[in-house]
Image (spheres, rainbow, N blue to C red):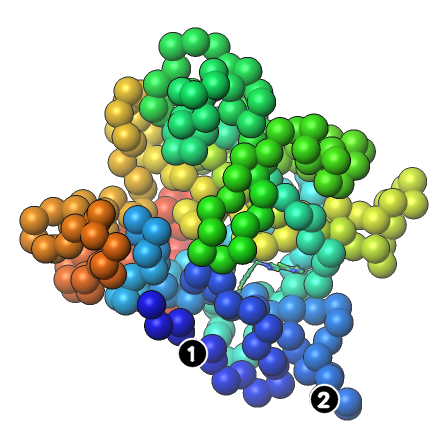
Amino acid sequence: MTPPVPLDLPGYVHVYSGKVRELYAPLDPATGSPSQDRLLLVASDRISAYDHVLESEIPDKGAVLTQLSLWWFEQLADLVPNHVVSDEVPAAVAGRALLVRRLEMLPVECIGRAYLTGGGLEDYRQNGSVCGVPLPEGLEDGSRLPGPIFTPTTKAPLGEHDLPMTFAEVEQEVGARLAAQVRDLTTAILSRGNGIAAARGILLADTKVEFGLDAASPDQDGNPTVVLADEVLTPDSSRFWPADQWQPGRTQPSYDKQFVRDWLTSAASGWDRGSGEAPPPLPDEIVDQTRAKYVEAYEALTGRTFAS
Ligand code: Q0Z
């Protein structure tokens, strides 16, 4: 796999590459040294499927997800402060980047689940519980859970898979007070998200959120403020399902990636998912249909028109 070349952004230094996003640090114009308290978070148009980053890009995907995340941060602002400083960014990344507060990130992927699928379903089938949270018998792929649950994982290095954590393990990592705080915030964010999405015909099966600490602004008790970071309630961090096609007992169609998955696993692609080979480039028609689904999700959720 060839890693993408980071953009040359004058006034910024590249600090990290994720699968489909990049992090930069602004340079202090006076000293030329990287900022210690700000980051530029840039979303690319890259897309992953079946654990591969595809060579085909989806035009405007980075901008749609950035604008959606920004909109969700506003919808959630009464529940939790967020890391956004500004959407005024270099022209080369206009619309698809945010300037954010640099936080001390908690070493936990905070996952909330409202429906059972994916890794949660595997854990349930083996143990009758997910991350130690006991669940009723008889649930199937896509079942709605009795209530939203917190199913944290470790943050594995890039290329490795995250592992389920129990709540007790999160407590050991960050302390009991913070563990309870991020658990309650994660389920509150997912519930708020589902409340808003339901009215638009979309289910949010699960979501991954990340929190950081802002030591510079202590809360009422003098503890560092817990801040919602990264991206929030985007199709890359959450499973979006069309509500009218929800049918427990099978794999649910994905709101955004279904055309990609269906084509990659069809005879037409000539690709064998189990081969370890890179998937082939997507046909233009699959790219166009997928772009339209991202825009449709953005417009349905926000009630805004996506302007590229
Ligand atoms: C986010 C990631 C990538 C995008 C670190 N506010 C923050 N403060 C400190 N660190 C982070 C954030 Cl958001 C942070 N990530 C994940 C990687 C592009 C987001 F390459 N890693």
Q: Looking at the image, which residue is at 85% across and 58% down? A: 216
Can residue 256 be seen here? The reply is yes
- Kindly report the distance in space between the C-alpha atoms of the residues bearing marks 2 and 1: 22 Å
Which amino acid type is marked by label 1? Val
Residue under numbered circle 1 = 5
Q: Looking at the image, which residue is at 58% across and 55% down? A: 230
Q: Is residue 217 left or right of residue 304?
A: right
Crowding near pointer 2: few (<14 within 10 Å), some, many (20+)? few
Q: Nearer the viewer, residue 15 or 128?
A: 128
Q: Is residue 80 left or right of residue 290?
A: right
Please tell me in which quadrant of the rendered image residue 181 appears: top right
Number of disc labels: 2
Which is more foreground, mark 2 or mark 1?
1
Q: Is residue 160 left or right of residue 2?
A: right
Crowding near pointer 1: few (<14 within 10 Å), some, many (20+)? few
Q: Could you tell me residue 198's position as x and y percent?
A: 43, 30
Name the residue furthest top.
137
Name the residue furthest left.
268
Q: Looking at the image, which residue is at 29% across and 61% down? A: 54
Determine whether 133 is above or below 1 in the image: above
Q: Could you tell me residue 165's position as x and y percent?
A: 59, 34
Q: Looking at the image, which residue is at 51% across and 44% down? A: 162
